[in-house]
Image (spheres, rainbow, N blue to C red):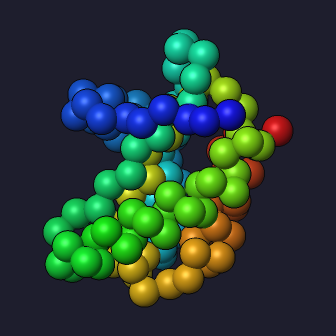
Amino acid sequence: MKSKTLKENKNFRRLYYRGKSYATPCLVTYIMPNRLGDTRVGITSGKKIGNAVKRNRARRVIRAAFSEYEDRLDKNYDIVFVARSKTPFVKMQKVSQEMGKHFKELGVLN
């Protein structure tokens, strides 16, 4: 299953205000059911994380970690991952481990 990308600001804001969230030192996950029949994913990394190189690395690491869980997730969810200041400095396996904890805590794994 290939997930779609969240791009519009209103969708991100809806998740921030109404979605369930779970945070760890490397990653924050917001999740909310949708009625579209597809999983949509958005990844953000703010300027607090560092320069463009670090922000891009943070997004790349999160995207790689998510690819491991993509097929095992329930459908019909909007998910936003927010990178934190530690994210560009950790390995993908660490982010993947934390992401797995988030998904189990939020109850969206098959």
Give the percent coordinates (x, y) of residue 65: 60, 63
Give the quarter of the figure containing the C terminus.
Answer: top right
Measuring 77% from the left and 43% from the top, which residue is drawn there?
72
Residue extending furthest toward the bottom:
89
Residue extending furthest toward the front:
2
Give the percent coordinates (x, y) of residue 108: 71, 39
Give the percent coordinates (x, y) of residue 75: 67, 27
Give the quarter of the figure containing the N terminus.
Answer: top right
For residue 55, what is the image quadrant?
bottom left
Number of marks drawn: 0
In the image, 2: left or right of 59? right
Residue 49 visible from this viewpoint: no
In the image, 68: left or right of 77? right
Q: Is residue 53 above or below residue 75?
A: below
Between 94 and 106, the one lying in front of the other is 94
Q: Is residue 109 above or below residue 74?
A: below
Measuring 18% from the left and 78% from the top, which residue is drawn there?
51
Give the percent coordinates (x, y) of residue 46: 22, 63
In the image, 17: left or right of 68? left
Measuring 39% from the left and 79% from the top, which residue is drawn there?
88
Between 44 and 28, the one lying in front of the other is 44
Measuring 56% from the left and 63% from the top, which residue is drawn there?
64
Residue 60 visible from this viewpoint: yes
Residue extending furthest toward the top:
35
Q: Is residue 28 above or below residue 89?
A: above
